[in-house]
């Protein structure tokens, strides 16, 4: 007992002194050993144990933006599933009172997590560049629009046939 440190690895169950932040064996963030199994794991601990240490280095850089707090939190959750830690910042130039959930947010990640985060979000079509025109007119590729053009084409052909018929009759 005396050789044990106050921190424990949640995966290996080995204990370490306070100067370790991550398990040297498996890289899991260390938690306080004294807490015991009965103690419920908090959301913060649950998040901490998902974070991969290789994504925690470097300055914070903006990887994506949410149009509001909820959207930014959605992005944050997706990143966390991949082990990438992130924080949210109110986008500059949009000064609204803090208690309002409105207003765009920047999603910031450590430099080490930027590339994987960017790839993940591109796969999910959520940034870094927001796709334009999502509220715009649907393109010709949308089924309803395509059907309209087909019908217009058929109507035009029918008129042409009728005109030709009139001309030759
Ligand atoms: Zn471990």
Image (cartoon, helix red, strand yellow):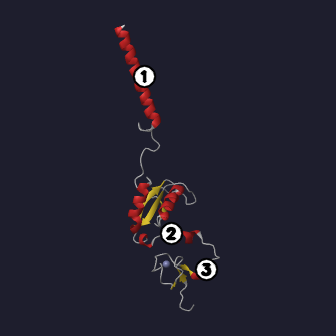
**Where's residue 136, x and y in %?**
45, 41
Q: Residue at x 45, y 54 (%)?
A: 124
Vertical relation: 24 (above or below) 100: below
The residue singled out by tag 3 in the image is 35
Q: Tell me the SS state at disc 2.
A: helix
Vertical relation: 35 (above or below) 88: below
Indicate the quadrant where residue 121 lies. bottom left
Residue 159 or residue 109, whichever sits in front: 159
Q: Are the residues flagged by discs 1 and 3 in contact, CB closer than 8 Å?
A: no
Q: Residue at x 44, y 27 (%)?
A: 151
Residue 45 lies left or right of residue 62; in this view the side is: right
Camera-near label (1 vs 3) is 1
The residue singled out by tag 1 in the image is 155
First in residue order: circle 1 vs circle 3: 3
Q: Tell me the SS state at disc 3.
A: helix
Residue 9 lies left or right of residue 160; in this view the side is: right
First in residue order: circle 2 vs circle 3: 3
Q: Residues within 10 Å of mark 2 (few under 14, many from 20)?
A: some
First in residue order: circle 2 vs circle 1: 2
Q: Label 2, label 3: how many angstroms apart (C-alpha)?
A: 19 Å
* Residue 107 visible (yes or no): yes
Q: Residue at x 42, y 22 (%)?
A: 155
Give residue 16's mark: none
The residue singled out by tag 2 in the image is 50
């Amino acid at each position: 007992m005396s050789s044990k440190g106050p921190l424990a690895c949640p995966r290996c169950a080995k204990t370490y002194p306070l100067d370790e932040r991550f398990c040297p064996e498996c890289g899991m963030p260390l938690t306080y050993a004294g807490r015991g199994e009965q103690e419920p794991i908090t959301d913060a601990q649950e998040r901490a144990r998902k974070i991969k240490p290789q994504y925690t280095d470097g300055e914070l850089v903006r990887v994506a933006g949410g149009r509001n707090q909820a959207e930014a939190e959605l992005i944050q959750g997706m990143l966390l599933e991949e082990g990438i830690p992130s924080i949210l910042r109110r986008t500059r130039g949009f000064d609204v009172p803090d208690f309002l959930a409105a207003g765009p947010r920047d999603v910031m990640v450590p430099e080490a997590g930027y590339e994987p985060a960017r790839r993940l979000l591109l796969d999910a079509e959520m940034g870094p560049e927001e796709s334009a025109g999502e509220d715009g007119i649907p393109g010709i590729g949308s089924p309803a629009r395509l059907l309209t053009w087909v019908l217009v084409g058929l109507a035009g052909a029918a008129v042409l046939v009728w005109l030709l018929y009139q001309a030759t009759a």
